Image (cartoon, coloured by chain):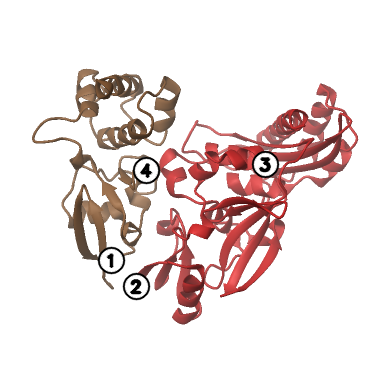
Chain colours: A brown, B red
């Protein structure tokens, strides 16, 4: 397999990785860089468990070729908590009982993060739209919506 | 294997030619890449500024092939001049897909019911393709499809750069509708797009495209002709619904829906999308 050096900014730090540029960003993050917070779900862009931010926009890491990350900013769930403290979105998920099995949670949180960066005071419809690419098979959508609304309030303070 | 981020259109074309026939391929959003066979080289054109622009030039709306669906759905100019395209771009896939998937990819991937492609077909879009630096040609939308999931855009040899669309003027409007099993992350059971021109309260021009009904978005020309000169009454939309249902050649799907269901669904969507396009045309004075 031919390798190529891909340079990008990962969670605020410059990284250079020699990798198969046609492999997925998801595989690069999990298998090469050891960032296991981003979950591998369907592998075909249908579940949103692998959602990361690419230059601030939510994308399915399973559908992004590693080579496409060249020169871009990649943000994963690992970038949210600081020094052992949860991010306000994560706190809100805990407080509102928005986590059941937890597999969809990192992707949900990253979709919420992308939303709140662009729209600090979203309505319920905007919240639903923002997480419409994330599946939760435990059927916890109501709590997730409440958590994102609560996170917006926390971030305003 | 090499992944090349193109820095210029000419550079991308040169890279295609240098690599040799069929060994390099153009991608933009690349969201369908992992579902397909991979070549030796990928040339990513998604960062070319001129392919991300939406402009009005010489009386035509020029939309870059690397415009993402979310960019299209956020474009005031596209909403004003080609609402069907903005509407399709808003409804397609999921936020994650819309953030990275492009209009050009939606067309070049040649899925029969690709939402943006259906809208572009109804809008009468033409495609501008380059096959070497400085050499381009313009193709009508219907000429971009070779068969089911098979495009005439040869991404190993040419670059789809822009779509040219006649912008909506006074008395003109367009719309797009889809019906899906879920609100997101779902291929449409059927979709429809229309563009109409009104004159003295009657339909002067009608373009009606539905899918899936064959390998490419399908124009329903008999229904279009039937509606010319009609007023904007409920009777007209009922006539459109019946005619579209009768005219469309549909396939059933064991997974999605039967032929009968899809035929009826396409008729209903056709009536509604024409009515919506006409309402917009009435407001567009």
C-beta proximity under 8 Å, tags 3 and 1: no
Does B119 appear above or below B45?
Answer: above
Quadrant assignment for the N terminus of chain A: bottom left
Does B14 appear above or below B80?
Answer: below
Q: Which residue lies under the disc numbered 1?
A: A20
C-beta proximity under 8 Å, tags 1 and 2: yes
Closer mark to the observer between disc 1 and disc 4:
4
Cα distance between the residues tagged 2 and 3: 41 Å
Query: Which chain does tag 4 point to?
Result: A
Query: Which chain does tag 3 point to?
Result: B
Quick one: SS at disc 1? loop
- Residue B112, given in percent of the width and then of the height, sits at 61, 50
Q: Which residue lies under the disc numbered 4?
A: A57
Q: Which residue lies under the disc numbered 2?
A: B1
Discs 4 and 3 lie in a common subunit: no
> Visible in this render: residue B93?
yes
Discs 4 and 2 lie in a common subunit: no
Of the numbered discs in the image, which one, if any, rests on residue B81? 3
B144 to the left or right of B35: right
Cα distance between the residues tagged 4 and 3: 26 Å
What is the crowding at mark 1: few (fewer than 14 residues within 10 Å), some, or many (at least 20)?
many
Residue B277, picture quadrant: top right
Residue occupying image coordinates x 28% and y 33%: A109
B97 to the left or right of B165: left
């Amino acid at each position: 397999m031919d390798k190529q050096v891909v340079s990008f900014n990962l969670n605020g730090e410059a990284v250079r990785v020699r990798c198969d540029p046609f492999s997925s960003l998801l595989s690069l993050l999990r298998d090469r860089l050891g960032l296991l917070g981003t979950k591998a779900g369907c592998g075909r862009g249908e579940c949103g468990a692998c959602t990361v931010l690419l230059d601030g926009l939510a994308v399915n890491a399973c559908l992004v070729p590693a080579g496409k990350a060249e020169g871009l900013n990649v943000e994963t769930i690992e970038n949210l908590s600081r020094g052992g403290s949860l991010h306000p979105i994560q706190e809100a998920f805990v407080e509102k009982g928005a986590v059941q099995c937890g597999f969809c949670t990192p992707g949900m949180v990253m979709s919420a993060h992308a939303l709140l960066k662009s729209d600090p005071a979203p309505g319920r419809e905007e919240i639903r739209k923002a997480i419409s690419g994330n599946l939760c098979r435990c059927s916890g959508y109501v709590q997730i919506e409440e958590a994102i609304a609560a996170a917006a309030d926390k971030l305003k303070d | 294997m090499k992944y090349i981020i193109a820095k210029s259109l000419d550079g991308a074309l040169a890279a295609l030619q240098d690599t040799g026939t069929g060994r390099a391929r153009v991608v933009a959003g690349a969201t369908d890449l992992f579902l397909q066979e991979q070549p030796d080289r990928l040339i990513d054109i998604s960062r070319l500024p001129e392919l991300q622009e939406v402009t009005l030039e010489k009386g035509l709306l020029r939309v870059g092939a690397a415009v993402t669906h979310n960019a299209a759905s956020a474009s005031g100019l596209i909403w004003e001049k080609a609402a069907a395209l903005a509407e399709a771009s808003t409804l397609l896939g999921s936020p994650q897909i819309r953030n990275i998937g492009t209009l050009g990819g939606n067309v070049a991937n040649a899925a029969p019911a690709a939402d943006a492609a259906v809208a572009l077909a109804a809008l009468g879009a033409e495609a501008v393709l380059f096959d070497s630096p400085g050499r381009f040609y313009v193709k009508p939308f219907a000429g971009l499809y070779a068969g089911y999931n098979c495009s005439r855009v040869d991404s190993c040899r040419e670059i789809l750069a822009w779509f040219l669309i006649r912008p909506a003027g006074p008395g003109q409007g367009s719309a797009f509708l889809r019906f899906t099993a879920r609100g997101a992350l779902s291929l449409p059971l059927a979709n429809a797009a229309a563009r109409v021109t009104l004159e003295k309260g009657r339909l002067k021009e009608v373009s009606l495209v539905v899918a899936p009904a064959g390998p490419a978005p399908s124009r329903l020309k008999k229904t279009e002709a039937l509606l010319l000169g009609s007023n904007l009454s409920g009777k007209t939309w009922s006539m459109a619904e019946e005619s579209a249902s009768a005219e469309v050649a549909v396939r059933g799907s064991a997974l999605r829906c039967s032929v009968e269901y899809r035929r009826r669904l396409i008729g209903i969507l056709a009536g509604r999308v024409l009515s919506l396009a006409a309402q917009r045309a009435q407001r567009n004075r």
